[in-house]
Image (cartoon, helix red, strand yellow):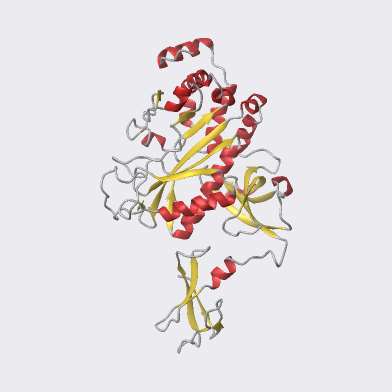
Amino acid sequence: MAQAVLPAMQCQVGAKAAVRARPAASAGGRVWGVRRSGRGTSGFKAMALGTASTGVVPRLEQLLNMDTKPCTDKIIAEYIWVGGSGIDIRSKSRTIEKPVEDPSELPKWNYDGSSTGQAPGEDSEVILYPQAIFKDPFRGGNNILVMCDTYTPAGEPIPTNKRHRAAQIFSDPKVVEQVPWFGIEQEYTLMQRDVNWPLGWPVGGYPGPQGPYYCAVGAEKSFGRDISDAHYKACLYAGINISGTNGEVMPGQWEYQVGPSVGIEAGDHIWISRYLLERITEQAGVVLTLDPKPIPGDWNGAGCHTNYSTKNMREDGGFEVIKKAILNLSLRHDLHISAYGEGNERRLTGLHETASIDTFSWGVANRGCSIRVGRDTEAKGKGYLEDRRPASNMDPYIVTGLLAETTILWEPTLEADALAAKKLALNV
């Protein structure tokens, strides 16, 4: 615990009585520290340590909750980007002279790419291009979160910049015409810090078998609800199109849904929602993992099921368009699997509501298939499909871009199309 020796002082907190810190007999001062708290924006409180502690003084909380608007027009912008692993999130803050409404009003910035695994030490500068703005639920006021993508000083996208290619796909006139909608179901697991074991599980042991935990209530069945609820509200405040949340099949695992989102917006919203979740778990002293199979054995993995539709799928006769899209997806199964997340082979086993990673399949209301079509879509003859293959750690820019490319822009040969239709028993 970081500590500091402060001289005897009197602290006035709100309307409470003054608290006097008595000097330590040996040092002529008093030892103060910072402890974790479940209350307040910061999750921390300053407290006096010692045998005669007079209580908690929320010094840091006062500063963290301070409204700067009466004092200055300047705001804080948190620039956020995807790091070198393709799944880690990085961010840093800068002062902007006045509130802004559009990313084009923000300056580009740079960072040391050699420290994130994205550039060599001898040429380490990576440039951040602001792309989307969200309200900052941690700082409040006019402060903002800024989703950025990453470029060399010459303006070339660096290899880990997957947003650039997705933006190209979503700006294609054929794709724009189809107004692609995405609804993404982000599953995640909460882990106890220092022991790498799910929240609510006995350390080194196991809870009862799966069954009672999905959408459950009760202290013995639901672990981490406050984190899920705090994240839900933070997303709504930020302007993320979050549509719901629920406890998952494995205890300590949760899911939230984002969408419907159009085009590149889907990826931006998922990445910022992940950033918010990382920050909230940081404050709670809990570790977030997007590992697709955090616990081996008879436990569900974590996916990122992606619901998808085009304008033609949502109109009358759309089920035939959906079946044609399924044909295309079957012919590019290996390509999609290779881009759908690291470690996905541990999850896509054909068990625990998954299809085998090696075999493409589809079905109506079948959660053991690669692609699921809902009963409502079948009955109405229009709607959407659900791609159940993406892992929880997938890059949403890659997944959404590939779905649009494969189903709108890519055209298979007639021979391949016919063979796939026969194999999948699809009359298209």
- Residue at the image position 39 percent from the left and 52 percent from the top: 191
Residue under the image location 57 percent in, 56 percent down:
137
Tell me where residue 266 appears, x and y as whole percent.
57, 38
* Whole-percent x, y for residue 10 in the image: 55, 84
Front position in the image: 179 or 105: 179
Say whether residue 208 is left or right of residue 280.
left
Residue ID at (51%, 55%)? 279
Q: Quadrant of the N terminus?
A: bottom left
- Is 359 above or below relative to 280? above
Q: 344 and 268: which one is in front? A: 268
Q: Could you tell me if residue 139 is visible in this image?
A: yes
Residue 47 is situated, as x and y percent measured from the top left of the image, at 47, 75
Residue 26 point in image, percent of width and height? 45, 88
Furthest residue to the bottom? 25
Task: From the viewer's perspective, tell me whether residue 121 is left or right of residue 422.
Answer: right
Residue 54 lies in what quarter of the image?
Answer: bottom left
Q: Nearer the viewer, residue 137 or 329?
A: 137
Can residue 277 be seen here? The reply is: no
Q: Is residue 27 left or right of residue 140?
A: left
Residue at coordinates 47% horizontally, 25% vertically from top-left?
Answer: 377
